[in-house]
């Protein structure tokens, strides 16, 4: 029989552990008919509630359930990478435990794999239940990302994705510390089938993704898969140097003609502040790339395991 590995990152999801398991196992008749064994790998990302205890209860009931618990919170990207390394399946699927990734889609996803696709990915066609401002920024991120990067990232794409072993091995070959999985999926390529569904709100618990965390995550994505911001910073620097040079000429000519050295100082101060702001902005862009390089060359482990069952 072939093996399907289900990877479930968790962070303070004690209320959803059993609900997710029960929903997933509703597909068990299909799995048996398809000739699939299942292993369920929960990756605990340093939860502070009773998530680990709930998973251990599941392990007592079902030996197909596995637990990998981090020593602290390393982030979802680290959890996804750890799950992919742990998975032994011929097919691997990434899912969230909050049931916003409906397990009912798995039979259709497996059918597309049987048709010859290398991976089957999901995307939300609506953002029902999300704040309007947050949804607008999300859409803008995807538009900007697809304009400045050669790696395609589909608007509304979820981490919920079924992959063949070949695709998983390709992803694992990318061992960078600063990971942006949505970009990695696009970078490795392979033939992908997209399944669309309407956004499903989580039934229990609260989202761990605040606006600020999503904003920082978007910056990670941009700097991980595009060097266009560096080019923009360089172009802006050249343009403002030319502008400053022309302005110096204007000041000299004005001095020679009108002989008034003090007039126009408010506009001069505004220009100085503008140029200084642009310089700091460009330095910030360079700093982002430098910080990523700094973290990469230190070669720290992506995660540390506290407990494995």
Image (cartoon, helix red, strand yellow):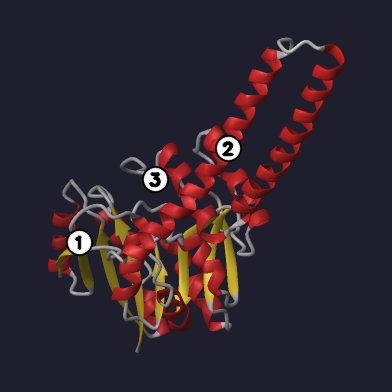
Rounded to the nearest angstrom, the CA distance separating label 1 from label 3 is: 23 Å
Q: Which residue is mark 3?
A: 202
Dot 1 crowding, Cα within 10 Å, few <14, some 14–19, many 20+: many
Instruction: Find numbered disc 3 in the image and state the secondary structure of the residue it sits on.
Output: loop
Q: Earlier in the sequence, mark 2 or mark 3?
A: 3
- Say left or right for 10 vs 199: left
Residue 242 is drawn in which quadrant?
top right
Instruction: Find numbered disc 1 in the image and state the secondary structure of the residue it sits on.
Output: strand
**Which numbered circle lies on residue 279?**
2
- Give how far across and how far down residue 214 sits, in percent: 45, 44
Query: What residue is drawn where x is 57% and y is 63%?
Result: 195
Q: Could you say which is closer to the camera, residue 301 or residue 130?
A: 301
Q: Earlier in the sequence, mark 1 or mark 3?
A: 1
Q: How many marks?
A: 3
Dot 2 crowding, Cα within 10 Å, few <14, some 14–19, many 20+: some
Q: Earlier in the sequence, mark 1 or mark 2?
A: 1
Whether 83 is drawn above or below 126: the answer is below
- Give how far across and how far down residue 287 sits, in percent: 47, 48
- Give how far across and how far down residue 80 sits, in percent: 36, 64
Mark 2–mark 3 contact, CB under 8 Å? no
């Amino acid at each position: 029989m072939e093996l399907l590995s289900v990877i479930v990152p968790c962070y303070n999801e004690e209320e959803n552990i059993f609900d997710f398991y029960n929903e997933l196992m509703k597909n068990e008749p299909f799995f048996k008919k398809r000739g699939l064994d299942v292993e369920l790998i929960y990756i605990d990302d340093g939860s502070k509630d009773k998530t680990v205890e709930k998973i251990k209860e599941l392990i007592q009931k079902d030996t197909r359930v596995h637990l990998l618990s981090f020593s602290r919170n390393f982030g979802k990207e680290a959890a996804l990478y750890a799950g992919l390394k742990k998975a032994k399946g011929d097919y691997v699927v990434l899912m969230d435990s909050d049931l916003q990734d409906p397990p009912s889609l798995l039979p259709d996803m497996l059918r597309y794999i049987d048709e010859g696709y290398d991976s089957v990915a999901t995307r939300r066609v609506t953002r029902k239940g999300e704040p309007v401002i947050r949804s607008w920024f999300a859409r803008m991120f995807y538009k900007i990302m697809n304009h400045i990067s050669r790696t395609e990232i589909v608007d509304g794409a979820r981490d919920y994705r079924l992959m063949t072993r070949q695709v998983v091995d390709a992803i694992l070959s990318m061992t960078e510390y600063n990971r942006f999985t949505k970009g990695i999926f696009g970078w490795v390529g392979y033939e992908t089938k997209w399944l669309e569904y309407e956004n499903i709100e989580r039934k229990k618990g609260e989202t761990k993704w605040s606006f600020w965390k999503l904003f920082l995550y978007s910056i990670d994505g941009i700097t991980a898969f595009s060097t266009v911001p560096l080019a923009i910073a360089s172009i802006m620097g050249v343009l403002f140097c030319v502008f400053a040079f022309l302005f110096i000429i204007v000041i000299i000519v004005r001095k020679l003609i009108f002989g008034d050295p003090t007039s126009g100082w408010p506009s001069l101060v505004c220009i100085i502040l503008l140029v200084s702001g642009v310089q700091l902005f460009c330095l910030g862009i360079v700093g982002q790339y430098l910080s990523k390089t700094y973290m990469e060359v230190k070669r720290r482990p992506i995660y540390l395991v506290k407990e494995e069952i």
